[in-house]
Amino acid sequence: MNSRDRILGRVRRALADVPPHDGSYEEAVPRNYLREHGKRTLQETVDLLAENLADYRAIVHRTDTADLPHLITRLLAAHGSTEMLVPPELPASWTAAADPVRIHDRAELTPERMDRVASVVTGCAVAIAETGTLVLDGSPDQGRRRISLIPDHHICVVRVPSQVVASVPQALERLDPTSPLTWISGPSATSDIELNRVEGVHGPRTLEVILLDD
Amino acid sequence: MSGTFVGMPAFPEAARTAVDDPTLRGNLRHATHTIRAKRASAVAELADWAELREAGRRIKDHTLRHLDRFLEQLEASVTAAGGTVHWAEDAEEANRIVAALVKETGESEVVKVKSMATQEIGLNEALQAEGIRAYETDLAELIVQLGKDRPSHILVPAIHRNRGEIRDIFTHEMAAWGRPAPEDLTDTPADLAEAARLHLREKFLRAKVGISGANFMVAETGTLVVVESEGNGRMCLTLPQTLISVVGIEKIVPTWRDLEVFLQTLPRSSTAERMNPYTSMWTGTSDEDGPRAFHLVLLDNGRTDTLADQIGRQALRCIRCSACLNVCPVYERAGGHAYGSVYPGPIGAILTPQLRGTASEIDASLPYASSLCGACYEVCPVAIDIPEVLVHLRERIVQGGPAVRHGNKVVLRPARGHAAERAAMRAAAWAFGHPGALRTGQRLAARSRRLHPRTLPGPGRAWSATRDLPAMPAEPFRDWWQRTHGGKDAK
């Protein structure tokens, strides 16, 4: 007998008191909690997202398609970046006006090389208003997980209101668990020193979120 | 301070030393009081907290009651997604599996995400014995590792250290492990975080093997979830070529949708945030993005023994948020080290004696490390009735009885050191069964009350050393009742 069989055997013996017809999972779990907290218009939900992002020290900008390239250019210049990482299918127009050299994410790009790039620009999959969270799912406008991790300055573009949901339950409905997912709520932080939140450990220390009107 | 829990004294002795340390008490009071108020306001933001808590409890209970089925489903999902599943009965087997997997890669160092399971099995020490160096990358774990210290809190293992102590540890110890601390390092938290960033970055960038635990495993999809703050988790989960996750078998949830409950309750309970900065979710392996090889080591190590106890099994619902530590009056004063386990505080007092058994003095003393005030139960996001389990375990220690150890049914003998308690209870049982004797005894006690000592003699001395004996009334209740007809004739 191997360890797998031994552990499963122990589990079954431990559960000898559980009757064979114990009720289904659906019956066992009440789902009477809220799908979202409070009633809001789409616009109010977007406002809440902006508020909660800022509350956790993300820097929030709002713009439209026409101004987006100029805004990105200004943000990169303000950060003093000479290079920026871009995922394979970031809309070309977004960075059309930007001076920094585009470093395209490719399999050959080593972590050490990425570490020398100051900024990264990505899209996102979903943004959650109630928690101020961005979710990236590795789609071609977001790229591999590492590109939004190693550079110290992350610019993330959220299409509003189409990519915004109110709550965590609504976000999970939109996401595909087979994609690698990264949930981001503000810049890298720690509470490890005296249980006080301090921004800036291993992930990007500056997170700028651009809410782009659809 | 040694890095091991083996041979620890029982809780009361260890706690006495801790209570005498004013720095430790100050550090703990500051940290726990800060987080308590923040948690309360984060929880108050959700009008449906009670419903979320109940759903969390039910999801975990249903999973535990059908754990065999969900384990098999998880194994199939992870395998289908490109992962390899290993099963470990105990710490020794888990350590052997992980060491062998690391050796297969030809590497001699690994980077680690904070993980309670790997702390529990002593993985770092086991890897060191095999010539493999494990680098802790969570800030608090780094402080513990560099300080050759032991963790004292589930979420913030270095909670017993203040900023000045952390600065000293970084200044003196970082050089031996890699990049030294900056020469003019101050004790401001931002500078300390920056020092950790610089020290660890070179390790992340060259790492070939990452080791993690997981907060949740989804049976239907094979998805693993790691919840963190700093980004060290993301580094370890995405940059190495090989990822090994060691996870307790109770960490399963049945469906993807179940995460909607725990991703709301866990961050608010643990760091009092609406959402923690980073959460990573991965299902097997993905082309180009992240590790090419993924190994999941499913760990029993006493969990099936715990599952066999119908009252005690609720401890397996725990999602390791640490809210119970932060509100506990005993933890606040005694600190985490006194519990002699990587699981301190109220949850540790019920989990450790079930995972390890109650054969050692420290483990048998843990169910008594509580005033039974119930604050832990109030804040628990999966409604573990910790006081109920504490009382249940006390009963088992004093009276002995059936239990399961290492998968085998055993009958525990009544613990030594509780003989006086058992004798007192036997005497009380006899007296309550003999009303005449009880009445005579009560009258004698009432009349002689001026002669009663303030403390108990003999084996009762320890009990009355920290408590006042109850004052004896001048007249036994039953005499008063008869004399006054239940108070009707009283003036």
Image (cartoon, helix red, strand yellow):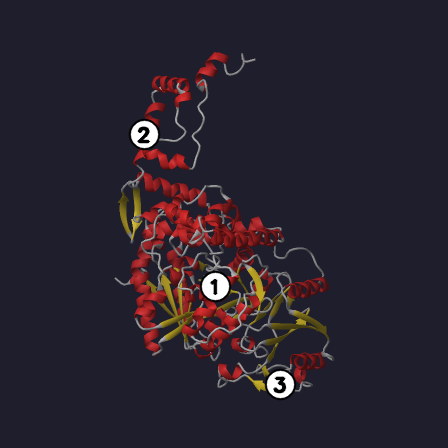
- Seen at 47% across and 54% down, the residue is B24
- Residue B313 in view: no
Q: Residue at x 37, y 63 (%)?
A: B298
Q: Quadrant of residue A46?
A: bottom right
Instruction: Tell me the amino acid under the disc marked 3.
Output: Thr
Q: Any mark on residue A82, and which?
A: 3
Dot 1 surroundings within 10 Å: few (below 14), some, or many (20 or more)? many
In this image, A82 relative to B368: left or right?
right
Chain letter of disc 3 in the image? A
Give percent across and percent down for residue B388.
43, 42
Q: Which disc is residue A142 wearing?
A: none
| Residue A192 relative to residue B107: left or right | right
- In the rendering, at what x and y percent does residue B9 appear? 34, 50
Amino acid at the residue labelled 1: Ala
Disc 3 on helix, strand or loop? loop
Inter-mark Cα distance, 2 to 3 = 82 Å
Around disc 2, counting alpha carbons within 10 Å, would you say few (fewer than 14), some (14 to 19), or many (20 or more)?
Answer: few
Distance in Å between CA atoms under marks 2 and 1: 49 Å
Q: Which residue is mark 2?
A: B426
Q: Secondary structure at mark 2?
A: helix
Residue B362 image offset from top left, x and y in percent: 34, 49
| Residue type highlighted by circle 2 | Arg
Looking at the rendered image, the disc whose residue lies closer to the viewer, 3 or 1, is 1
User: Where does label 1 land, which residue?
Assistant: B140
Q: Is residue B127 above or below residue B6?
A: below
